[in-house]
Amino acid sequence: MSSTTVTIDPAHTTPSQNVQNFLSTTRKMLIGGQWVDSVSGKSFPVYNPATGEEMARVAEGDSADIDLAVQAAQKAFETGPWGKMQPLERSRIIWKIGDLMYENIEELSELESIDNGKSMGVAKAVDLPLSADTFHYYAGWATKIEGQTIPLSVPYAPGQNYHAYTLREPVGVVGQIIPWNFPLLMLAWKLGPALATGCTVVLKPAEETPLTALRMGELMLEAGLPEGVVNIVPGYGETAGAALAAHDGVNKVAFTGSSEVGKLIVQAASGNLKKVSLELGGKSPNVIFKDAADIEAAIQGASNAIFFNHGQVCTAGSRLYAEQGVYDQVVEGITENAKKIRLGAGLDPNADMGPLVSQVQLDRVNGYIDCGLNEGAKMVAGGKVDHSGYFVAPTVLTDTKHEMKIIREEIFGPVVAIEPFKDVEEILPVANDSTYGLAAALWTRDLSKAHLTAARLQAGTVWINCYHVYDASLPFGGYKQSGWGREMGHAALENYLETKSVCVAL
Ligand code: ADP
């Protein structure tokens, strides 16, 4: 097996002075507009994924802090200025949050990069604009949340006239639990619609990546968000996260993360039957037909589908299917691309791919690769990486079988399996045979085949001749065990709204 040595220039693991200042003190949590230590006085370490070394400490919230944060969110919802604000005032604050993200794009991109491991250039070009634009998009919705007037024909009251209408009201206090793969983007997807609808929030960032959420807390106060509207409690999933999901004072929980934890959230939420929305895992099929208009473009798209964000994307195109006739060309192209990718620290401008987020993820992804090889898969790109950071070489596997664990389970790393297929009727049942249903993609120039196949794919998003296209206006979410509900677009507002019917006898 080949091996890659990653050399890291210390200059690429030393953040700017600005960011060093931010990291130099234990970061506190945001409750009721105040920056406070945890009730227990404990803090937890945050590691630099490029070196494996501790780079910051953050206050460690648990159930006691969640209690305080929920109380602050309840107070802000019930008696604070937020509930009395006109929609346009809310809109202006949400817009301003987006503006402040753009104004602080350098610092936020750098923090995101050193926290998560992703390239700072990518954070700046992709994560930051998408996140800021999500706030701008939802700022627009705050003034457009409307009920309906509804004509009645009550059969047992002929002749009686009624005026009936619906009001859309915020669901109340919302618990939001987010993952580490896109810390800022997931924060924006959650907070945008919650704030547009007038909810108040307790947000728990992932323990691996709490830094940008805490910086955003400062920016949200600067934008004029009243105290207690957004409370940020960093901490571990089993303690802070579980307490938030179970809390009786929380009316709704929104979660993005693994399907296993999603099931725990549902159980925890059952105590007070709080509303639940879930964005969970995926094992997305990416199907290249031999009539694709441009096979080279499909190969580049398929490489991006799996290697973007180091494969740590719930929609990663981890199952690649190439039609007989182009299979060899696809394997060769993806393998060549994988071998060209330079590993390095997120702050290294010449690196194409950074480390995974944590030692746990490194062990998990390497475990899956070993498992695939033991089950008979062939590795055409990949191999051991010599470095103490959490690096995995872009890995391409062939000779896999549909029953293998690496084809059934989400790996969440830069690992793709490529299988050949005969025609659309053969591949559709294979593509759909998954417990997940988050995304799928297909590449063809045949318009009818494209649309007919898209309709038959069991996935919340289908990309045709493209991959990883996200927009604040486009609903996103999963079929089957990939989730409940939709984020983004108008659809996401539904997660945070109640409908009240008002009926007046005239
Ligand atoms: P991953 O496997 O990708 O790390 P997880 O689903 O474990 O994703 O984590 C996503 C988020 O869920 C994180 O913020 C984590 O702290 C939180 N979390 C983990 N376990 C629980 C739990 N039992 N209850 C609530 N939240 C949890």
Image (tube, rainbow, N blue to C red):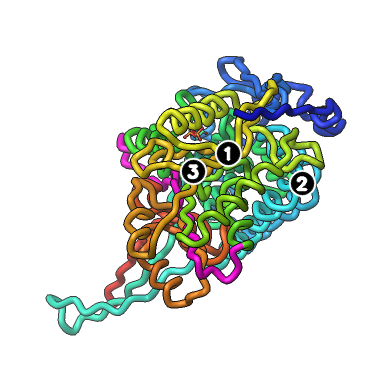
As measured in the structure, the alpha-carbon distance from the residue carrying label 3 to the one carrying label 2 is: 31 Å
Labelled disc at residue 395 = 1
> Nearer the observer, disc 3 or disc 2?
3
Residue 211 coordinates in the image, percent (x, y): 68, 33
Question: Left or right: 417 with respect to 335?
Answer: left
Q: Which residues are magenta?
A: 270-295
Quarter holding residue 120: top right
Q: Position of residue 473 (x, y in %)?
A: 56, 64
Give the camera-side residue of 50 and 125. 50
* Of residues 334 and 387, the one drawn nearer to the viewer in this rendering: 334
| Mark 3 burial class by Cα count in 10 Å: few <14, some 14-19, many 20+ | many
Q: Name the residue that disc number 2 marks.
A: 121
The relative height of residue 76 versus residue 365 in the rendered view (above or below) is below
Work out whether 380 lies above or below 236.
below
Query: Does label 2 or label 1 sit earlier along the sequence?
Result: 2
- In percent of width and height, residue 276 lies at 38, 45
The residue drawn where x is 25% and y is 81% is 161
Q: CA distance from mark 1 to mark 3?
A: 10 Å
Q: Residue at x 33, y 76 (%)?
A: 150
**From the image, which quarter does the C terminus lie in?**
bottom left
| Label 3 sits on residue | 398
Name the amino acid, label 3. Thr
Which quadrant is home to the N terminus?
A: top right
